[in-house]
């Protein structure tokens, strides 16, 4: 039988505009760079990752595939139904037989907490056991009890892969960073 106690599943939803960080790179590019380094350094080939796409409900379990999916992600900056994207990502990740399940929303434009509240309600109602995280670039959202919101003032801070490690695995796994708040 396959042991899933040390396997983690991470679902990601990008809700990004075409804005730029202080390093003159798009917010999306900064987030992708930080995530790729985080995956390379911290995930194993049996860990599972899913990047939201409206027509795909398949997760991957190889670090190389994770890196490829993130690297190839593009956006034209158009808004979409974030609540629906979070819901689909939640159900894809929850279906994987892992003990540690995390859904991450990375956004630089969301200012309404309703999509987070909605996905949290599904998570709780169906007892899916997923941790809901929101990386709030630009600090547009208030803190809430039903999701971990990390306020990042500038997307260039995301290039530090240790920041994603702290966000996903907790502060006990790395030295405290002084350039962001939770």
Image (cartoon, rainbow, N blue to C red):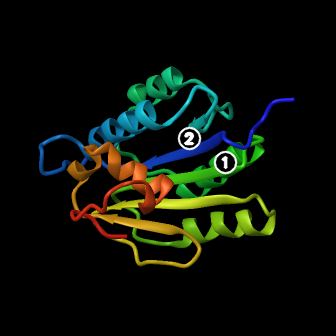
For the residues labelled 2 and 1, say whether their Cβ atoms are less than 8 Å apart. yes
- Element type where label 1 sits in the image: helix
Q: Residue 114 lies in what quarter of the image? A: bottom right
The answer to which of 31 and 166 lies nearer the viewer is 166
Residue 39 visible in the picture = yes
Say if 144 sits above or below 39 in the image: below
Q: Which mark is residue 88?
A: 1
At horizontal 52% and vertical 22% (from top left) the residue drawn is 65
Say if 51 sits above or below 84 in the image: above
- For this view, does 39 lie left or right of residue 88? left
Residue 76 visible in the picture = no
Q: Which residue is mark 2?
A: 52
Q: Residue 174 lies in what quarter of the image? A: bottom left
Within-10-Å neighbours for mark 2: few <14, some 14–19, many 20+:
many
Q: Which mark is residue 57?
A: none
The number of callouts visible is: 2
């Amino acid at each position: 039988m396959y042991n899933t106690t040390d396997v983690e599943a991470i679902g990601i939803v990008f809700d990004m505009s075409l804005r730029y960080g202080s390093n003159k790179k798009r917010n999306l590019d900064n987030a992708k760079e930080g995530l790729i380094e985080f995956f390379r350094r911290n995930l194993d080939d049996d860990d599972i990752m899913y990047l939201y796409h409206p027509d795909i409900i398949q997760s991957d379990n190889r670090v190389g595939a994770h890196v490829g999916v993130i690297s190839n992600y593009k956006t034209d900056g158009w808004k979409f139904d974030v609540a629906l994207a979070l819901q689909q990502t939640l159900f894809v990740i929850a279906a994987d037989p892992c003990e540690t399940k995390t859904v991450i929303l990375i956004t630089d434009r969301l200012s309404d907490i309703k999509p987070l509240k909605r996905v949290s309600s599904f998570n709780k109602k169906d007892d899916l056991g997923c941790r809901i995280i929101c990386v709030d670039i630009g600090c547009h959202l208030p803190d809430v009890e039903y999701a971990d919101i990390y306020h990042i003032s500038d997307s260039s801070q995301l290039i530090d892969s240790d920041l994603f490690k702290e966000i996903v695995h907790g502060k006990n796994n790395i030295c405290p960073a002084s350039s962001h708040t939770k």
